[in-house]
Amino acid sequence: MRICVILEGCYPYVTGGVSSWMHQYIQAMPQHEFVLWTIGANSSDRGKFKYELPDNVVEVKELFLNDALSMHFRKERYRFRDDELEQLKRFIECGSPDWDTLFHIYHDKQISPIAFLMSEDFLNILTRICREDYPYTAFSDLFHTVRSMLLPVLYTIQSEVPKADVYHAIATGYAGVLARLGSYVNHVPYLLTEHGIYTREREEEIIRAKWVLPAFKRFWVRFFYMLSNGAYANATLITSLFSRARQLQIEMGCPPERCRYIVNGIHFDRFAAIPYKKPDGWTDIGAVLRIAPIKDVKTLLYAFADLKTRVPNVRLHVCGPEDDPEYAQECYDLVKQLRVEDVYFPGTVNVLEKMQEFDFTMLTSISEGMPLSVLESFAAGRPVVTTDVGCCKELVNGMNAQDDLGPAGLCVPPMHREAISGAMEQLCTHPEERYRMGVAGRERVRRYYRHEEMIQNYLEAYEEVFAQWQASDSV
């Protein structure tokens, strides 16, 4: 089977998280060929892979959204039909356009996106939107906002589509649009896997974003919902990582019969073999993450500074790449401003080796799905202090009635400095409780979160997708 996986902003350009998951996923299926169809923000990243690609990756097709800005204007005589204009109007309004019509215009006919965005038809639609919805906003602001939304999407639609037997988007958004395009062009099925709920994550970013004018924040949120809903609509199968995420997908319009969750899994034996740290008079806390705003490293640093005033001989190791260099520098500066000692930033590490230095680990994210770092820490017998995001609470306490193992750490509200500091203090000062929690976490992963079982579930999902596609095709 030739599987095209579609990835946005992750593998193979950054390490950790979804990227690690994807790399191990491909390695675990040597019987299949994989095509990587990657979506990045900036073409300066072209070819800068952080991974040595497995032998069964037979093609990489890179797409960078900033290349849309260098598209040339082509004067065209194409006259849109009334039905096409109606779908373009829905697209501009971020409603529910017929994506097959958009694919026909911009992929099959290769009509210039720039020509449309400079056309009288576009200006008429935009003028009406401005008059009705933004009467006190400068038209030029609306024009540039909508253009910056739509141009990258139309650019992606014009992409050359790699051949595959099935398309598998590891997110909705732009990746979901390309999965649906691949299905449209080659008449094969596609499926979606969400590690986090894409639209909710984008919504949180837009709310906090300084680059979005306040008047247009709702518009941007509608835009990302439009992309996701378009991907959900035609997918043969939609998977998530836990039951609550599946429920959110259904609430957003996914047909329940097409939604299921497949839990993450890790290589249990590798982490279970990690020895406990030898006592040295210090308590060492690890945080394995990407240094980025969504991981909320700053709150972790503030909480650790509080902890240092109450608990002696404690060290914090913040391990991982600088996913956002500007934010990373702010974190380094914050450590200096707080004058807190014993904070280390070793960069990207070999987790199997570094875990030997930790007594327990931290995750202070403001958004997550089912984080691999938590499962890896559990498998190594290290409890975790985590924020109550994604399914972290269920991982800590058990996700089903049969799980009687007890807590494998502590779960606290996100961005709550005092609660995070208090939880760290509890684990620092109660080593016997810390050990019991570590034992519970290790057993929980052994029973429920093994990599080989996850891979088998996805192989069965591919078989199901083909069976459903063939059945619907024969009707």
Image (tube, rainbow, N blue to C red):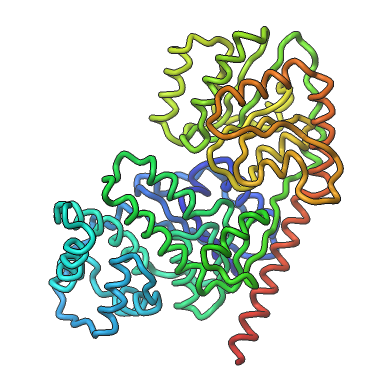
Which quarter of the image is occupied by the C terminus?
A: bottom right
The residue drawn where x is 50% and y is 54% is 198
Residue 207 x/y as whole percent: 38, 44
Corner quadrant of residue 446: top right
The answer to whether one can see residue 49 in this image is: yes
**Relative to 377, residue 29 above or below:** below
Which quarter of the image is occupied by the N terminus?
A: bottom right
- Residue farthest to the bottom? 475
The residue drawn where x is 60% and y is 69% is 2
Say how many tags the image has. Answer: 0
The residue drawn where x is 66% and y is 41% is 392
The residue drawn where x is 49% and y is 58% is 60
Residue 291 x/y as whole percent: 50, 32
The answer to whether one can see residue 1 in this image is: no
Nearer the observer, 433 or 474: 433
**Relative to 110, residue 334 above or below:** above
Corner quadrant of residue 127: bottom left
Residue 457 x/y as whole percent: 73, 62
Residue 156 x/y as whole percent: 36, 64
In the image: residue 177, left or right of residue 435: left
